[in-house]
Amino acid sequence: MNQSYKAFTSKDWPAVSPVPGSPAFGSSATRSAAPAVDPSNVLAFVTGLSDPNHSILIRALLDRESLPVSDTASDFSGLSAGPSAYSMLQDRLDRIKEESALKFLEFRDKWRKRLAFVQLHPFLQRNQWFQQDLAGFSLIGKGTRKEAKMLYLQSLHDMASDGERQVSSLSGLIFRLQGELAASWHRESVSDDRSKLLPALEAALRNGETELFKRVRLSLGDLALDTFTERVARWDKRVYGSEEELFRGIAWPWQNARYRSGFEGFMESFADLAQAVCGAMIEHYQRKWDLFLRGLAPPQLSLFPRAALPRPIITPAP
């Protein structure tokens, strides 16, 4: 995702982690020379994601775990594991990956056609974006930020909105899957207070991580607009020999031999970024649920200290 972001914006990934309440990655205020992660802030970041109500529940469960218990307490080996939910995860995520790849193939094909010279040029021409003089063909105006924004809104805004919808559609599939996984997991794993700890932790983090990905998705449109207006500005000195040559070079930062115009290059780079966001989302939830659904292993007992009742001394019969 970092490479896709830099290819599209010509900037490094934002250094500031998009924790709840902070700007999303589309904001220029969060961009810096290089991404940085401070391990000491990981706990604070996770805490920022958690729901206070669930945090209270987890605290109560931990307090109860510290009380003396009888020998009838649940076995710790594989505590809170969800084998049925795990099988569901593998099957459904594979299908989501396939659907995501197919949707972006369709997206690229559709917008290659809509951004082609024969489709977009007549529209821009009717809106009087082109002028001709003795030197050749050029765009109207000087390329101020306001003019670049208007050009973006008339040429690429609908494409970026459509790309954001593709990410939103995938998000919906994943979030619905989460609800089904949690329900299946709880049915097969929760039997006592001890087995509620892991599901409670997952539930505490779920809304926060959902909001995190939502902000990233909603930032895509603003990122596309800001990137275009910043990088395409000042076109008053660019003169071309024909209108078709001018059209190909309008979005010049994304002009590439692989693409028929800078518009197409912008779309492809934006699609790469949107698809990378989807890929990061899928990978995150796959790793998350793979971790939770395995349950807790015996060596992790130290995470939940408990004071066991003293065992009675049994003397063998003579």
Image: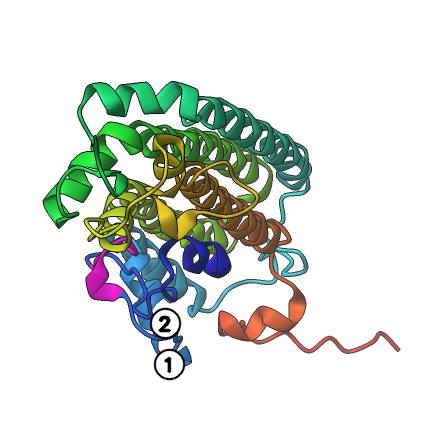
Across and down, in percent, residue 190 comes to 53, 44
Q: Is residue 25 magenta?
A: yes
Across and down, in percent, residue 242 comes to 36, 34
For the residue pair 277 and 185, the one nearer the viewer reads as 277
In the rendered image, the vertical position of residue 280 relative to residue 158, given as above or below: below
- Can residue 127 be seen in the rendering of this structure? yes
In the rendered image, the vertical position of residue 218 relative to residue 16, given as above or below: above
- Give the color scheme: rainbow, by chain, secondary structure or one colour: rainbow
Q: Residue at x 89, y 78 (%)?
A: 318
Asked whether, in this view, residue 289 is left or right of residue 204, the answer is right
What residue did someone put label 2 on? 43
Q: CA distance from mark 1 to mark 2?
A: 7 Å
Dot 2 lies on which element? helix
Three-letter code for the amino acid on which mark 1 is drawn = Ser
The disc placed on residue 40 is 1
- Give the extent of the magenta segment: 22-30
For the residue pair 210 and 88, the one nearer the viewer reads as 210
